[in-house]
Amino acid sequence: MHSTDSEKYSDQELVSQSVQNNERFKYIIEKYEQPLLRYIRRLTNVTNEDAEDILQETFIKAYQNLNSYNPKMPFSSWIYRIAHNQVISDFRSRKARPHGNSVVISDEQYDSMFQDDTDIEQDIDKAILREHMQTALQKLDAKYRDVLVLKYLEEKSYKEISDILRKPEGTIATLINRAKKKLKKVINQQ
Amino acid sequence: MIDDIQKKILDKIQEENITPKPRWNFLLKEYVLWSTAGVSVIVGGLAVSVIIHRFATSDLDFIREAEFGTFRYVMSMMPYFWVVLLAILAGIIYYNIVHTEKGYHYRFSVFFMVLLSLTLMLGVILHLAGVARMSERLLLQSDSSLLRLAAPKPELWMNPDDGMLVGMIIETSDGMNFQIKDIYGEEWEIIVIEGADVRGDPHADMFARMIGEQEDEYIFRATKIRLREDSDDFFPHKPYKQGKQLMKEFSR
């Protein structure tokens, strides 16, 4: 077996193999550890070590619950959901409200977030706005921040976000709209 | 560092002998959630049917004439136990469905409308099938204090001082007058005043709900009377009618 097995086999195949043989689970870890670690860091303000602990718990939970995975759903949505729940669980155990780390937003991600809104860009310089947005994201409520991170930073579809957050797609669309308005408001106040 | 994470996870799995939970665990949970939701819908339907039954047998036209006021009359009629039970069940159904594998796809408004339609439809069907009536009679007979909470309370209309009286006709006398036995077993002479609003022809074993005024001890002058053949719905705890006999009669 080579580490390229994580690319050679589909997620569904890797799940089936992992249920039979725990050694195969390493290919799932290999494929998802970086995206999930990045996602956890975007949602939390914990240290790197703590983020890795959350990641480790995420994979352990995923392994224990492999048989609950429904192959009709993308595996990435399923494991992102576990990571999201683990982040919430970690916040509760620390009794702290989730705040994200300083989020780095690329030009593409910025354009994608405000592609339909030109008015705000006319008033504020784009570079300043982007810089403000990075801190503004941290000031948003977790529910708004979660959807913006998933939609624009993790580049997930509405369907995927719906599966990750276990909310109807219509609710996700509403949350994203509201989150964008809240974000603009926070940016304008800065 | 990444390799370290991989190693840590795999070592933990090995050392703590962690294994995937069997599939049946998840299937069982899913079945339990859906089954509980299904049972809750049925009990919710029963609650709705009882609520319909209560209003259908409550002689709503008495509201305006009730001495103690419309609000109190309506409040006295409300099947609180069933309303509270219905609200609790709605919560259980929502929680259960949302926590199933696909339940989160449904919006609350859609879920609420579907649930409302289902329980209302089932409630109407159960009411028409006579299930609510049977349930009321069984509850009235019950010795359990919890079940008695859910039972109808004819004593709420047993208020002669405020001009309301209920009872079962035991004998008719000359003209329209008759005697009743109230829910506490006391016998009353009912004088039906001339021009009284009487619906039905009074005869023994009928249930009578009356508005009027108390003339003397155990003498009541009725101005408005509503009669029902189904006195057992209100007085099923007659000593000579036991549960099994009631069920037998009902199924006939």
Image: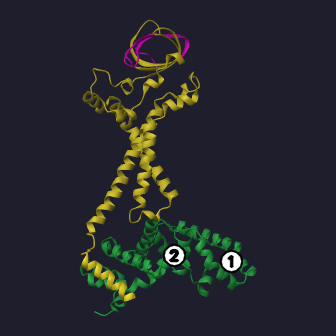
Chain colours: A green, B yellow
Residue A52 appears in the figure: yes
Image coords of residue B130 (percent x, y): 37, 36
Q: Chain of mark 1?
A: A
Q: Is residue B200 above or below residue B249?
A: above
Q: Is residue B95 above or below residue B207?
A: below
The answer to whether residue B184 is magenta is yes
Q: Nearer the viewer, mark 2 or mark 1?
A: 2
Image coords of residue B14 (percent x, y): 25, 79
Q: Which residue is mark 1?
A: A117
Q: Is residue B237 above or below residue A115?
A: above
Q: Name the residue at 41% across, 17% down.
A: B182
Which residue lies most toward the top here? B174
Which span is picked out in magenta? B176-205
Q: Amino acid at mark 1?
A: Asp
The answer to whether residue B85 is magenta is no
Image coords of residue A65 (percent x, y): 32, 72
Q: Name the residue at 57% across, 84% down.
A: A104
Q: Is residue B239 left or right of residue A143?
A: left
Q: Which residue is mark 2?
A: A45
Quadrant, the N terminus of chain B: bottom left
Q: Chain of mark 2?
A: A
